Image (cartoon, rainbow, N blue to C red):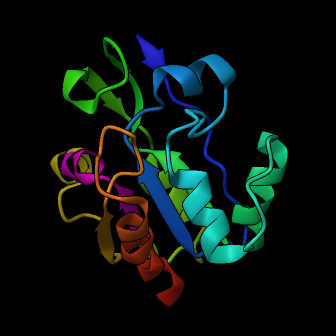
Amino acid sequence: MISSFPALASKTSKILILGTMPGVKSLEKHEYYAHPQNAFWKIMFSLFSKLPVPPDFESRKKILIANDIALWDVLESCERAGSLDSNIKNGIPNKIPELLENHPNIKALIFNGKESHKIFVKTFGSSISLPQIVMPSTSPANTMKFDMKLENWKTILNF
């Protein structure tokens, strides 16, 4: 079994971005989206900073907190060979309703890829009535060009 990280959220968080489960590189480094080819941080810094992505995770986290963005995964733990979501078995969900109850300013759920949303809907159904928006996965396994991913992710600026 592998386990996800604690939620990254502040009292002022307005958006919750949900992945599925950290990949192998992220688990090794104990950092969200640590694979160097994952576009997540490049997208966040393109949207909110215009500065280059800093190498240290603490600085990366600050851009999310400063822009009222929370980050977590749909799954708390699972079995998975490698990093692909398609290899996930025996997933145990995170306590997302509890997180939302403790962070009432969160007004939208943004899913990093289709699989995180699929698992979320299967687990929670329609019990959470916030807007749910599925973004293209920032994973290098998604071969969509960066500019197209960035264009799609601009949707989060509306919240």
**Placement of 126 over or under 36, stated as above or below:** below
Image side of residue 122 versus residue 146, left or right: left
Residue at 78% x, 71% y: name it: 66
Residue at 59% x, 77% y: name it: 105
Residue at 22% x, 44% y: name it: 119
Residue 72, position as x, y percentages in the image: 52, 47
Image side of residue 159 versus residue 84, left or right: right
Please say whether residue 102 is visible from this viewpoint: no
Residue 41, position as x, y percentages in the image: 61, 53
Residue at 53% x, 84% y: name it: 157
Q: Quadrant of residue 88?
A: top left
Residue in front for this viewpoint, 122 or 118: 118
* Magenta-drawn stretch contains 136: no
Residue in front for this viewpoint, 38 or 120: 38
Residue 87, position as x, y percentages in the image: 22, 21
**Placement of 102 over or under 66, stated as above or below:** above
Q: Quadrant of residue 62?
A: bottom right
Residue closest to the far bottom: 158
Residue in front for this viewpoint, 83 or 73: 83
Image side of residue 125 versus residue 106, left or right: left
Boundaries of the magenta span: 109-118
Q: Quadrant of residue 7?
A: top right
